Amino acid sequence: LRDVVLVAELKSRPGQLSFPSAGIGQTTHLSGEMFGMRTGTKAIHVPYRGSVPATTSLVSGETTFMFDNLTQALPQIRSGKLRALAVTSAERVASLPEVPTMAQAGVNDFVVTGWAGFFVSAKTPPAIVAKLQDSLIKAMRDPEVVAKIREMGSLPGGQPQAKFAAFVDSEQRLWGQIVRHSNLSLD
């Protein structure tokens, strides 16, 4: 698989190849750090001020590989400027059905998804939280909304509040582990 070629190249040239990110501590950065942890490789991190300049560095050949949000990368992939090696979701995505998941490409324990959530103050009355939750789930099941989200390369959400809270907890643990392992500091 193509990802195996990237891993072999990184192992043959440790610390010589580079990956851009949207900035220190961004998901695009931490995903690169996770990739190094999961594959036993080391690459140079090149932080940019946002995803667009980071992607531009990859397109121009200044950097070697990148983890980017599909909504940002999809137009570049469709135009042939970037080649998708794998998706970081648990399953293949409808907008790139030929692209394997990280597990299918040989990198296990690597599921990273960009997500957005709705949060309210902890003091919000339960009745209002329930009404907001019902409205959000209804919107996430609307066929037009689902179609638009999928068109952008994303997956619609709409989890019940308790399940979403558990997901946020797991994300905090995962990224905390990556930050600690990589000795990252945001100063």
Image (spheres, rainbow, N blue to C red):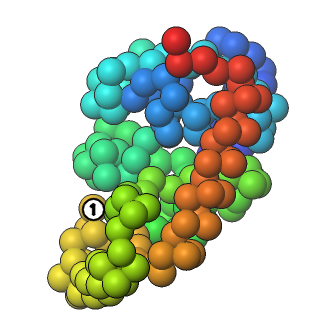
Q: Is residue 80 above or below residue 154?
A: above
Q: Relative to 65, does residue 44 appear above or below in the rendering?
A: above
Instruction: Please report the residue visible at 43 percent of the width from the left and 41 percent of the height from the top.
Output: 68
Classed neighbour count for the residue bearing mark 1: other residues with Cα under 10 Å, few (<14), some (14–19), many (≥20): some
Q: Quadrant of residue 10?
A: top right
Residue, x 71% and y 25% (percent of image)?
182
Q: Residue at x 74, y 16 (%)?
A: 14
- Whether 98 is drawn above or below 186: the answer is below
Disc 1 residue type? Met
Q: Residue furthest right?
A: 40
Q: Nearer the viewer, residue 55 or 96?
A: 55
Q: Is residue 155 left or right of residue 109?
A: left
The total of numbered circles placed on residues is 1
- Left or right placement of residue 111 versus residue 93 in this view: right
Observer able to see residue 5: no
Which of the two residues, 25 or 41, is positioned nearer the viewer here?
25
Residue 172 seen in the figure:
yes
Residue 37 in percent (x, y) is at: 76, 35
Q: Position of residue 163 (x, y in %)?
A: 56, 75
Q: Quadrant of residue 6?
A: top right
- Residue found 52% across the figure and 70% down from its top: 164
Residue 82, horizontal then vertical, whole percent: 38, 40
- Secondary structure category for the residue under label 1: loop
* Closer to the camera in the image, 109 or 17: 109
Residue annotated with mark 1: 152
From the top left corner, tell me how far across and down residue 69 is, in percent.
40, 47
